[in-house]
Image (spheres, helix red, strand yellow):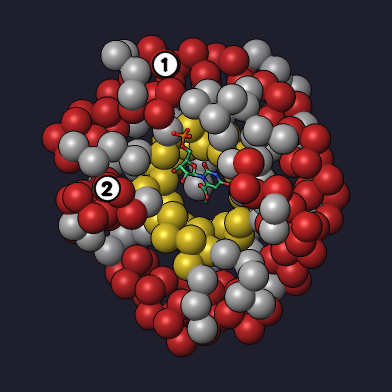
Amino acid sequence: MKMDSRLILALDETDVPKALHVLDEVCGIIDAVKINWPLILSAGPEIITTLSQKADVICDFKIADIPNTDRLIIEQSVKRGASGVIVHAFTGTDSLKECVSAAGGRDVFVVTEMSHPGGQEFTAKHAEEFAAMAAECGASGLIAPATRPERIKKIKESAPGLLILSPGVGAQGGSASNAVLNGADYVIVGRSIYGSSDPKDAAQKLADEIKALRF
Ligand code: O7M
C-alpha cells in the first residue's frame, strides 16, 4: 500500500452506484479503500474486483475463526483482488499465523483495541498483547483507536515495527491530527467522507490536515 496521503476510505456506503461515485471522486487522494460487510452484502463479492481496478482494496472481514476457515476466507479475498485483509487477534497465534501465510505477502492488519466505547470493555485489556502477538506472527500492521489517541502510542510501543491504521476519525469523535501525532501511520475515515455532500473536498481537507503535520 502506498503511503502518500495516509488516508484510507472506509466505504461502508450500501447504495452501490453512490459508493462507486464516491470512490471515483476520491481515488486520487486516498492511499487505499477499506470495504466491510455492508457494501459486500449490498453489491456482492464482485465489488472487491471492481474496486481493486481503481485503488488498493483492504477487505475488512474482521476474520476470527479456526485457521482452516481463516485461510479459505483470505484465499477468496485475495483471488478477487484484495491487497490486504483485516483479522481479529483473540483467536490466537495459530489462527493469526495461518492468516499471514494465506495472505501470501499481502498485508494482514490485526485489530487491537476497538474505537467504540465497548472497545474498552474487553479489547483494551488485551490490546498490547494482541499487538505483540501480531508482530510475532508476521502481520503488517495493527488497527488502533483514533478515539483514544493516547492508546495508539501505547499499542505502537508493543509492536514498534508495525504500521498503525486508525479508525474513529470524524463521526466517532476522533481527530486525524491527534491520531497521527500519537503514532498512526494511516487514518481510516468513513462517514465523514462518503456521507459528505462533497466527498472529494472532505477527503482533500483530511489529506491536507495530515500533510500539514509532516514531519
Ligand atoms: O468513519 P466511520 O466511523 O464512518 O467508519 C469507521 C470504519 O472503521 C468502519 O468501517 C468501522 O467498521 C471501522 N472500524 C472502527 O470504526 N473501529 C474499530 O475499532 C475498527 C474498525 C476497523 O476498521 O477495523 C478494522
**Residue located beneath label 1 in the image:** 202
| Residue closest to the far left | 17
Disc 1 secondary structure class: helix
Using the image, determine if residue 103 lies above or below residue 67.
above
Q: Which residue is drawn at 18% across and 51% down?
A: 43
Tell whether circle 2 marks a residue whose Cβ is less than 8 angstroms from ligand 1.
no
Residue 91 position, x and y percent, is 61, 75
For the question of whether residue 98 can be seen, the reply is yes
**Residue located beneath label 2 in the image:** 39
Q: Which of 97 and 44 is in front in this view?
A: 44
Disc 2 secondary structure class: helix
| Residue closest to the far bottom | 68
Image quadrant in which you'd find residue 161? bottom right
Q: Which amino acid, by three-letter code, is at mark 2?
A: Leu
Q: Which amino acid, by three-letter code, is at mark 1?
A: Ala
Using the image, determine if residue 110 lies above or below residue 114.
below
